[in-house]
Each structure stands twice: as structure tokens, then as C-alpha cells.
Amino acid sequence: MNLTTSRRINTRTQTSEQLNQLIVEGIQDKKGKNIVQLDLRNLGDAPTDFFIICEGDSNTHVKAISDSIYKKVKESLETMPTHMEGSTNAKWILMDYFNTVVHVFYPETREFYEIEQLWSDAKVTEFGEV
């Protein structure tokens, strides 16, 4: 690996860490619950580098969490998700930031899809509620 490649990898890691920290802060700002980060980088068939998963108590809470994430990341990194789904009924809002995909769930929906179990080989980081 040459110096240029090393710098690109380090920059990408720093950017992912910054993005993920801002996402978690956005979740915590709205009292999101059961916050988990799955590091998928060492899994060969992973669709992205990271999943960040959390839940809200109601559809309104789920929407408020996703709005908080959107605003915090846009203001701090001038970045918006490449794709968003689920805002209409707010049972599961997906926010795709390319290297990080955020899943904001209603509790029953999270339990039904069991994303953590599907990717159980990933390195897991849990974040406490603030």
C-alpha cells in the first residue's frame, strides 16, 4: 500500500467515525433507545460498512429521531442521505449514508425483522441512553 492509498483509507475511516458519532448524537438528542452500531467491514457479503440501529416509542418519536439525525449530519458535515425510506408511516425509517445505513425502528418492527441477528457476525457497539 502506498502513501496515497493509506491517506485515503485513513480519511475514509475518520469520515465514517465522524458520521457515525453525529448519527448517534442525533439519536441521543431525541432520547432514542437501544442504540447499536454493527461494524460490517470484515464481512464479505455486507451491503455497507456500518449499520446503526435504534428505536423510538411511537411513530412520532421514530420520525423525530430521523429528523434529528438528518439535521445534525447536514449541519455538521454538509451531507444528506443518498436515500431515505419509511417516513410516511414511521414504523421503520431507513437512512442510507452510503458507508453507514441507519435503521430507526418502532419496537415491534425491530423485533420482527431481527437485523442484529441477521448480521450476528458483525462487531457490535452498544451506546447508552443519555
Image (tube, grey):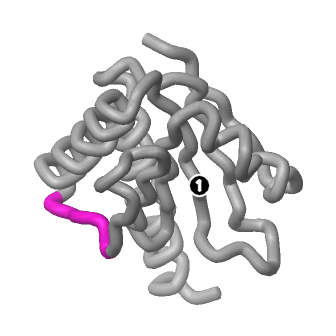
The image quarter containing residue 23 is top left
9 versus 67 height, above or below: below
* Residue 92 picture location, percent across and down: 48, 50
Q: Residues within 10 Å of mark 1 (few under 14, many from 20)?
A: many
Task: Give the SS element for disc 1.
Answer: strand
Q: Which residue is mark 1?
A: 51
Which is nearer the eye, 99 or 91? Answer: 91
Give the magenta-colored segment's residue range: 78-82
* Residue 75 picture location, percent across and down: 12, 48
Farthest right residue in view: 121
- Secondary structure, magenta segment, majority class: loop
Give me the residue at 49% from left, 61% from top. 100
Quadrant that contains the C terminus: top left
Q: Is residue 127 left or right of residue 76?
A: right
Q: Is residue 59 left or right of residue 80?
A: right
* Residue 64 picture location, percent across and down: 26, 34
Q: Amino acid at mark 1?
A: Phe
Give me the residue at 47% from left, 53% from top. 102
Q: Is residue 72 left or right of residue 43?
A: left
52 versus 100 height, above or below: above
Q: Is residue 114 magenta?
A: no
Give me the residue at 32% from left, 44% from top. 66
* Residue 76 picture location, percent across and down: 17, 48
Which is nearer the eye, 57 or 36? Answer: 57
